[in-house]
Structures are given as structure tokens and as C-alpha cells.
Amino acid sequence: MATPTDLENLKSSLRRDYDPFATKVTIQSHLDEIADRRAELPVSYSAPGGGCWIVTTYDDISSVLRRNNRGFVSFPNEPPTEQKNLQGKRKRMIPIELDGSVHRQYRNLLDPLFAPGAVAKLEPKLRAAANHLIDQFIERGSCDFSREFALPYPGGTVMGIMGWPLEDMVQLSEWADIMMHGIYGATDEENNQARAEASQELGGYLTAMIAERRAAPARDDVTSLLLDGKIDGEPLPDDDVFDAFLLMVFAGLDTVQSALSQCMLYLGRHQDRWDEMFAGPDTLVPAIEELLRWTTMPVPTRTATETVEVGGIVLPAGERLHCPLGAANRDPRYFERPDEVIFDRPRTKPHIAFGVGPHRCLGSHLARLELRIGFEELRRRLPSFRIDPGVTPEEHLGMAWGVNNVNLLFPPGERDS
Ligand code: HEM
């Protein structure tokens, strides 16, 4: 068994600091750094913020996530950093930071409404939401795609599954966006102020929704499922319903927004690929899978609860491991020329953009449906587009890597309604 001195020696011999919230980097330059790290030190130690192990290979990342509840737990599911040291100073996010039996009960409750058959019913609503948003900018011949489509569109999906009014979609998405990313170009002080206000307003909205729906008859949606659900035989208190609502908003919005924005940025720079995606009846779905691999944004973190071995390194309980899924999905061991988008890539291994193990994405079927319908409607209404050369897209890391702004130019079209 490793003694404390052994561990300190190990940390110093494998030390290479990592900044999960680095600014002024592009996602690709960050992935280049990870590729170098993977080649030099596949599992490395980063000291800032209390310390964390950075895992970079497909096999090691999958193995850590699969061993959730068997050597690892998911709380706190955020990387340690000096800038944002929130660890342990807040409640657990439900269900992503719950483990064991309580987590399983939440999944048993929620899984049926996120199954493929259940989410397929949302298709007409998704198409309507996509077209409503495109109508707002189609005559203009230009848009900030991230703000005007990629953000509110998954907001509409969240409204659909939760059974909340669709007309609140834009407002809800804006609150969530400010809370997650602040305001583009604002000072730190302005951002803190805006975040506090958005958090209060979103909180007020969710609290009012709980009260309104508790007083109304049950419906076939996630809101009723949580309000009427039981964990350990007890109804969920409002606080826990609130937390589960909040996670649904964040998990459902930021990921899809990032995938859509990164994809349209790539496709605007490679119009031949936009055509290729729609070349035949069977080309869109594999293209979306490859784009999901290439745009992978989530960055799970786990904590060891017993002595564990990862990539040949033995670590004691209490050590934390950061597992950027983009690193796994760009591992050249399984994805040849990993930085290229190859729609007919041979399937050596499935990508793990939706994670693996007990916390595997609850919304994966919904996300795939959103992307397919979103792309179909965008293709119908924007058969060609390009990136506005006058606006530089800004990318960010953080809890979900993404792009803040993707400004598109295209031949103006007519509104659908
Ligand atoms: C491209 C879109 C999406 C991607 C890439 C994605 C990815 C992920 C990943 C990797 C996890 C596991 C994180 C971990 O292990 O720590 C996760 C969990 C989760 N996702 Fe998604 N997600 C997407 C869309 C959605 C949508 C649309 C929803 C629902 C509205 C959703 C709801 C959730 C929930 C509730 C969890 C927690 C599951 C649990 O803890 O058991 N996600 N997602």
C-alpha cells in the first residue's frame, strides 16, 4: 500500500498542471495540449486548487466512469481549480452527483420518460421550435447562431419534456446562459451582478412552477414525475425537486448548444461537409455521431473511495480524477486522425460523448433527436451559409467546452409562418 510519502513522490514525478478553466485558448489548442500530455504522461498530476489527476486515454477514462460506485463516487463533479474552488461548499446536483441506491432510484424514476419511444413524441414540438427560431432571422440573411438558435432551441426541448410553456423558452435559456457563461464582453463585476440576478430570476421561475404544478392535476411530463416521485419511499421535498429541475435545465441546454454551435462553425468553414451530411437517406445519422465525437464537451470528475489503479498508477481513497471526454474521443488508439471529421469513420470503438457507467447521459436519445431535427430544418431553410469574416468566434473551456458566438451569413429566405 502506498504511504503518504510515496504519494507525494508520485505526485511530484507525474506533475503537469492543468487549467480546466483556461481562457484565451481554443478547444483545438487545448486538445493539442492533451494529446501531448497523453503521449508523455497519460495520467498526470495537477496541483492547483487542492490537486487532481488528469486522465487522458479512452481506456482509462471509460474505466474510471464505469467504476462509479465501485471505487469512485461522482461528488463533487467539478475539477479543482484555484480560480473556482467550489468543492464541497454546495448541495449535490441531482442526480449527477448522487451515487448508489438513491441515484439508481432517480434513474428508475426518470429513465422511462427519456426512452427513445417517449422522446420521439416530442418531434413535432422540436420542429415547430426550430422553425419558429429560424423565422426570426431568415429574412435578415445573417444571425448570431449561438444566441439565436443553438441556445434557445434546446431551451424549447427542456420546456417540452418538463411540460413548461414554450413561450418562456427564450427567457429561460437566457437566464441559464448568463449563469453558465456570463455576458459576452462584460467586466467581472457586471458579470457577477448579472449572474446573481439571473440566478434569482430563474430560481423564482422554478419555485413558482413547483407551486403551480403541485396545485394542478398530474400530467405526462418530467415535472409531474418528480413531483409525484418517491425516493426511499418518501415524496421528494420541494428543495430536491428544485435541484433536479435546475440540473435538467443546465444539462439539457449547455451541451446541445455547444454541439450545435461547434458543428455550425465547422460546417460554415467546410460547406462541402454540409452537403455531404445530406448526400443520401442514411448519411445524416452517422454524420451526427461523428460530430458528437468531435465536439465532445463534458468533463466529468470522480473521487476515489478506496485504493484504485488507473493507467498502471495506484492511488489511495480521496484522490480526485478529472476525465475530459474530449480526450477519450480524440485518443488516436481508437480514432485514427482524431482531429479530423470523418463521416464514414470505421467504428473501432463507440464514442463516449454521453459518458459511460451509471451516470451515462439520461438525455442521450433526446439530444440525438434534437440534433437530427435541428439539422434537418436548418438544411431546409439554410442550404448554404458561411461564417461572417468580420466576427471572430470565441471559444471557452469550463464545465462544457463550447463557442460563445457563431455569426453566420446566408442568402435571405422567407418566413415559414
Ligand atoms: C449533445 C448533448 C449532450 C451530451 C454530449 C451530454 C453528455 C452527458 C454526459 C457525458 C453525462 C455524464 C456526466 C458524468 O458522468 O459526470 C450526462 C449526464 C446527464 N445528462 Fe446529458 N448530455 C447531452 C444532452 C442532454 C440532454 C438534452 C438532457 C436532458 C434534457 C441531458 C440530461 C442529463 C442528465 C439529467 C444527466 C445526469 C445523469 C445521471 O447522473 O445519471 N443531457 N450527459
Image (cartoon, grey):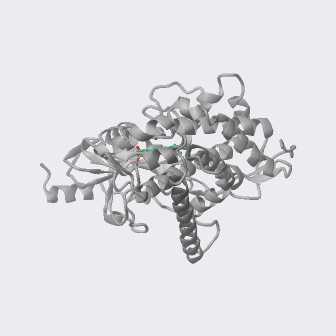
Q: Is residue 238 above or below residue 351?
A: below
In the rendered view, does 47 fall on the left or right side of 279?
Answer: left
State the residue at coordinates (73%, 58%).
391
Q: Is residue 413 above or below residue 11?
A: above
Asked whether residue 121 appears in the rendered view, the answer is: yes
Comparing 333 with 178, the one in front is 178
State the residue at coordinates (62%, 38%).
371
Quadrant of the rendering where the C terminus is positioned: top right
Quarter of image, res 239: bottom left
In the rendered view, does 3 fall on the left or right side of 324?
Answer: left
Comparing 226 with 277, the one in front is 226
- Residue 226 image point, x, y percent: 45, 47
Quarter of image, res 87: bottom left
Q: Is residue 375 above or below residue 241?
A: above
- Residue 11 image point, x, y percent: 26, 57
Comparing 254 with 99, the one in front is 99
